[in-house]
Amino acid sequence: MNWDQIEGKWTEFKGKARQKWGELTDDELDQVQGNREELAGKIQAKYGKTREEAKREIDEWANSV
């Protein structure tokens, strides 16, 4: 799925993101509002990953939903 579709329907995909990245809070996911860069930053901070690792995870997740 392309990111524009996910961003446009973020309220629907927020729950799926929560399942994938359980350490992210609902408030953090609300702040992201579908912004891929912000999501990468939150994943990077919570999980101690590099920016590239976080973006790769997001891409894999987006392709699976």
Image (cartoon, helix red, strand yellow):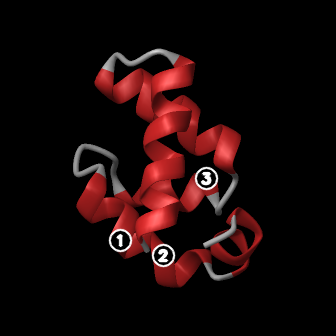
Disc 1 residue crowd, few under 14, some 14–19, many 20+, Cα 10 Å: some
Disc 2 residue crowd, few under 14, some 14–19, many 20+, Cα 10 Å: some
Quadrant of the image containing the N terminus: bottom right
Q: Amino acid at mark 1?
A: Lys
Q: Circles 1 and 3: CB distance less than 8 Å?
A: no
* Residue 23 image point, x, y percent: 24, 43
- Name the N-terminal-most of marks 1 and 3: 1
* Residue 31 image point, x, y percent: 59, 53
Q: Nearer the viewer, mark 1 or mark 3?
A: 1
Quadrant of the image containing the C terminus: bottom left
Judge whether 49 appears above or below 5 on screen: above
Quarter holding residue 34: bottom right
Give the left or right position of residue 2, taking residue 17 as reference. right
Q: Residue at x 54, y 49 (%)?
A: 59
Q: Decide if residue 28 is in sight here.
A: no
| Residue placed under numbered mark 1 in the picture | 16
Q: Secondary structure at mark 3?
A: helix
Give the spatial CA distance, label 3 vs label 2: 12 Å
Instruction: Tell me, for residue 52, which label it has, or none.
Output: none
> Of residues 50 and 33, which is closer to you in this image?
50
Instruction: Tell me, for residue 32, which label it has, or none.
Output: 3
Q: Amino acid at mark 3?
A: Val
- Name the N-terminal-most of marks 3 and 2: 2
Judge whether 12 appears above or below 37 on screen: below
Give the spatial CA distance, label 1 vs label 2: 5 Å
| Residue placed under numbered mark 2 in the picture | 13
Give the spatial CA distance, label 1 vs label 3: 14 Å
Disc 3 residue crowd, few under 14, some 14–19, many 20+, Cα 10 Å: some
